[in-house]
Image (spheres, coloured by chain):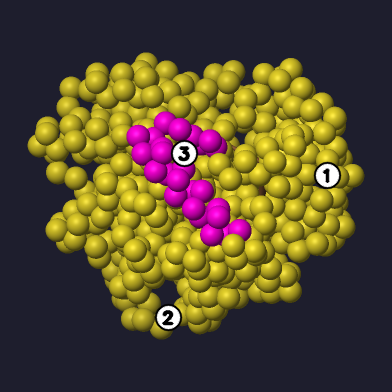
Amino acid sequence: MIMLISYMQRSSKLLILHKFISSIRLYNSFASQLSPTFHAFSNVDSLVSALITAISTCSSISYCRALHCRVIKSVNYNHGFIGDQLVSSYVELGCTKDALELFDELPDKDLVSWNSLISGFSRRADLGICLGLLFRMRFEMGLKPNEVTVIPVVSACAGVGELDVGKCIHGIAVKSGMLLEVKVVNSLINLYGKCGCLEAACCLFEGMSVQSLVSWNSMVAVHVHMGLAEKGIGYFIMMRRAGINSDQATVVSLLLACENLGVRKLAEAVHGYILNGGLDGNLAIATALLDLYAKLGILSDSCKVFGEMINPDAVAWTAMLSSYAMHGRGREAIEHFELMIREGVLPDHVTFTHLLCACSHSGLVEEGKNYFKIMHKVYGVELRVEHYSCMVDLLGRSGHLNDAYNLIKSMPIEPNCGVWGALIGACRVRGNIELGKEVAERLFSLDPSDSRNYITLSNMYSAAGQWRDASKVRALMKERVLIRNPGCSYIEHGNKIHCYVMGDQSHPDTERIYNKLEELVRKNREVGFASKTEYVLHDVDEEVKEDLINKHSEKLAIAFGLLATNAGMPLIITKNIRICGDCHGFAKLISLIEKRPIIIRDTKRFHHFTNGLCSCGDYW
DNA sequence: TTAGGGTTAG
């Protein structure tokens, strides 16, 4: 209980809850907007029924207000629970203040009224309001929560990762004997799974007398969500063996598992499963598939899936926009966004995150600035911290470091690690050590455990030849027991993922790979390519530097790919960190000399190398 | 009750 109260005190949004609104709002100004069809009803019951249908399906705030006005004029809020329906629609449309004000005005609220409002705020992942309502319902009204109350509250806890609060609700559920209800257990499986307590999730699952399709789906989903794709697929197999038929939620989780594993063969198999089951018309599945193909490097397939969609929604449009952004197609991303607007689909905050990111990746500074300026004014989308991160990246990487810094200083919200991270990244690209050092200090205090901050600063010093400063940062890392993950490159071939680290000799074909690599290095030299040894961030002789750089993991993966696949076949390689500048130049030339398209994905984006050029236009 | 789009740094 103390835990719940402390959470409520932390949530400032609860202030809204305690505001008592006594006067009825003046909705009369909206009366004129009412559809004349409502005047035709002589019987009140039929009018209420028509109004309820209209309210539950209305998609605009102004129309909802107009309907509300009609309700005030003609009927009682309790008639057919029309008041509850209005409250639910206000929440769905994002008018949370209107919803809470109207809710307080409703004369006879029962358990269903409270539950439907809690459920609405749960869908908005607003745990603070959910808990506030739960308390008011329990202690002001004396109503005892039932399963329908508990499930959305648990779901909201899972949504925001509030495990401790979720555990309290779990306790309430146990005391009230709600654990016999399958849906309650399912919501708890989801809570524990999402919060990383897979053991607790499994324990609940095993303890169920009957597991429903949703219970199985939850087990697949939570494992995939935690990065354990193989285990998630394992649950899918067990589910099929238990004779449970999958549905769209299962398939979406399977697609996410494919993304997690990065295996194209598996993705194609799941795509076949989707086509066989006639599930390709499902929008959520098609969106997940589109996104998966983009993340596997096959943008043309993403475009194909998007082209076949009927009435794509904002999520589908955004997934396609993000795919263009990820592949460095800034201009196409902008065209796609403009088309989305012309088609009448409203963009949201995620759409703008990708749009700004697309501008940033392609160096479209003026376009990005313009979208940032109008996103709230024209489209009503609130500026979030991630939008600032994108803008800092856009300004900083294009060389306007001071503008980027000034933007951070002018932020009306607290800049987080993401924003400062974008700035330090730009400092590294632009070689501004002074500012980089200052930003690194901020990052060290904001999150001392993130090894990336130390590595970036150390690499900046190394690139400038300040070896002593670089080693000081490394020593600090060691002192704080922070580990650096080695850079590695992956390439899929023959139902296997082949992984290489720098200087790797573990592959059975090592000798052939190194011979091929030597040949490639020689060919590159013959056409005048000199190794960019400044990318070797170790204080060693020039000769050793050249030897080290020629054994980078992406070069080994390229050599293996050329040996293992037929002439002309594209090579798709994934890296766990950013591609190095020398390897970028190397891949460009190899794509020309060997006549091979090479696609390299680093942590987030793709570089498409064809005929000696890269899709990023060397802007990255 | 489960499921689709999330930027920025190694």
- Residue A35 tag number: 2
Q: State whether the magenta stretch is mostly helix, strand or loop.
A: helix
Residue under label 1, please give it: A464
Give the residue displayed 51% in from the left and 61% down from the top.
A590
Quadrant occupied by the N terminus of chain A = top right
> Are discs 3 and 1 less than 8 Å apart at CB?
no
Q: Tell me the shade of chain A.
A: yellow
Measured Cα–Cα span from mark 3 to mark 1: 28 Å
Tell me the subunit letter for badge 3.
Answer: A
- Label 2, residues with CA under 10 Å away: few <14, some 14-19, many ≥20: few
Query: Is residue A409 visible from the viewing direction of this image?
Result: yes
Point out which mark residue A500 bears: 3
Q: Nearer the viewer, residue A446 or A429?
A: A429
Q: Colour of chain B?
A: brown
Residues at marks 1 and 2, CA–CA distance in whole angstroms: 70 Å
Tell which tag, 2 or 3, sits nearer the viewer: 3
Residue nearest the observer in this picture, A575 or A196: A575
Q: Would you say the residues marked 2 and 3 are in contact, meaning their CB atoms lie under 8 Å apart?
A: no
Q: Nearer the viewer, mark 1 or mark 2?
A: 1
Chain to which mark 1 belongs: A
The region drawn magenta spans A501-525
